[in-house]
Amino acid sequence: MIDEDVLTETTCPLEMLNTKNTNPKDAIGTRKAPMSTVPANVLKEVGVGMMEGSRKYGRHNYRVAGIRASVYYDATQRHMMDWWEGEDLDPDSGLSHITKGICSLIVLRDAMLNDKMTDDRPPSTDISELRNTMQNAVDDIFRKYPTSPPAYVRSNE
């Protein structure tokens, strides 16, 4: 049993201090990346999606050869657009387009973290003024039309 006087809010979440005696591993483990917050069913799908990529291109090929950012941006956008337009499953793999998009983003982020990404995005622009202009336009539309007809909802035919 750990001495409760040693535990503070900086070593252990307040709710743990108030609910149970704890051990040192609890106090330390609760301050690390919380893997329990990530849904396991999604991770399982992503594992299958990543396995498909490894079977097609070679496991962790993106860490060796590197990637171009535009290729994975484009793949993510295509999967998201196909899903948005009503095609739930990728016809090539049978996996969800959402899962395939997540896999593309995982490869992109891994390449960024490992300095294996060729940044072929267009030259940067200051989008803050455009963002503010568009938000003002949206705000004006909401003021002009404070209510709207109900949105169309797809039927589950």
Image (cartoon, helix red, strand yellow):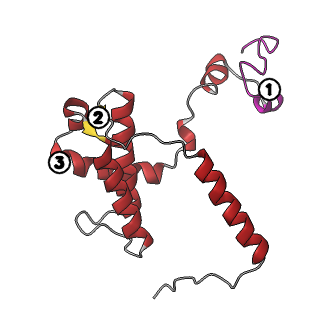
Q: With respect to residue 8, does 77 lie above or below? A: below
For the residues labelled 2 and 1, say whether their Cβ atoms are less than 8 Å apart.
Answer: no
Query: In the image, residue 108 lies at what x, y percent?
Result: 35, 41
Q: Amino acid at mark 2?
A: Thr
Vertical arrangement, residue 5 with respect to residue 62, above or below: above
Please give the label number shown on residue 17: 1
Q: Position of residue 147 (x, y in %)?
A: 76, 79
Residue at position x 20%, y 30% in the image: 64
Q: Tell us which disc is closer to us: 3 or 1.
A: 3
Residue nearer the viewer, 104 or 89? 104
Q: What is the quadrant of the C terminus in the image? A: bottom left
**First along the sequence among labels 3 and 1:** 1
Q: Which mark is residue 118?
A: 2
Q: In the drawing, what numbered circle is on residue 55?
A: 3
What residue is shown at x 32% (from left), y 63% (from top)?
Answer: 95
Residue 57 image position (x, y, % from top left)? 16, 45
Q: Which residues are magenta?
A: 2-19
